[in-house]
Image (tube, rainbow, N blue to C red):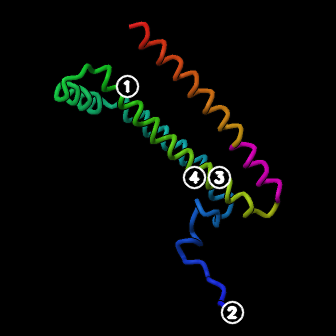
């Protein structure tokens, strides 16, 4: 008979593995992490040095500044989606690590509602991009 395997310290501290308390996954990763990500992205897009760097990249690559801005916004959006998926999976898996089972259900409900909202916004944004590029 094999001895039961003890989880490694890395697995014990894993958010994506679902071994962290729900409050950490929800409040630290999902809420504070998402707000921080959004604030940093907005700050970066407003900085004059970033505008200058994007202008220089557009000259080096011989592209219009509009194309560089679209690609930069797309890169930020893709990185946010990856972070959003990581946080959502973490909260979903950690939802069993709470004293009251209803908090886990509330967390899963919030994640589900947020998924619907994000996919709706992505659908609207994609439609706007298609319309924008088809008019040119």
- Magenta span covers which residues? 101-111
Residue drawn at (83%, 54%) of the image = 102
Label located before the other in sequence (2 or 4):
2
Between residues 120 and 42, which one lies in front from this camera angle? 120
- Point 19% across, 28% down: residue: 61
Q: Residue 80, image x and y in percent?
A: 49, 41
Looking at the image, the residue that sits furthest to the bottom is: 1
Quadrant in the picture for the C terminus: top left
Q: Which residue is mark 1?
A: 70
Badge 2 or badge 1: first in the primary sequence: 2
- Percent across and percent down for residue 65 are 27, 21
Q: Position of residue 97 (x, y in %)?
A: 72, 64
Q: In 3D space, how far apart are the residues under numbered discs 2 and 3 (Cα atoms)?
A: 39 Å
Disc 2 to disc 1, C-alpha distance: 59 Å
Query: N-terminal of the two: label 2 or label 3?
Result: 2
Closer to the chain start, of discs 4 and 1, is 4
Can residue 47 be found in the magenta stretch? no
Q: Nearer the viewer, residue 28 or 64?
A: 64
Residue 55 sits in quarter: top left
Query: Mark 4 sits on what residue?
Result: 29
Q: Which label number is shown at residue 1?
A: 2
Eye-nearest disc, 4 or 1: 1
Element class at badge 4: helix
Q: What secondary structure do most residues of the magenta stretch adopt? A: helix
CA gap between label 4 and label 1 equals 27 Å
User: How far apart are the two marked residues, 2 and 4, measured between alpha carbons?
Assistant: 40 Å
Which of discs 2 and 4 lies nearer the camera? The answer is 2
């Amino acid at each position: 008979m094999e001895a039961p395997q003890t989880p490694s310290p890395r697995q014990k501290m894993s958010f994506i593995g679902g071994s962290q308390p729900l409050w950490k996954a929800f409040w630290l990763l999902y809420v504070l992490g998402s707000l921080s990500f959004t604030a940093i992205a907005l700050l970066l897009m407003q900085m004059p040095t970033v505008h200058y760097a994007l202008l220089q990249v557009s000259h080096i690559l011989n592209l219009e500044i509009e194309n560089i801005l679209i690609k930069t916004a797309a890169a930020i959006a893709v990185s946010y989606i990856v972070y959003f998926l990581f946080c959502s999976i973490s909260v979903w898996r950690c939802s069993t690590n709470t004293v009251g089972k209803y908090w886990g259900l509330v967390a899963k409900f919030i994640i589900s509602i947020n998924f619907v909202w994000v996919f709706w916004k992505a659908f609207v944004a994609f439609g706007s991009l298609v319309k924008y590029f088809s008019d040119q």
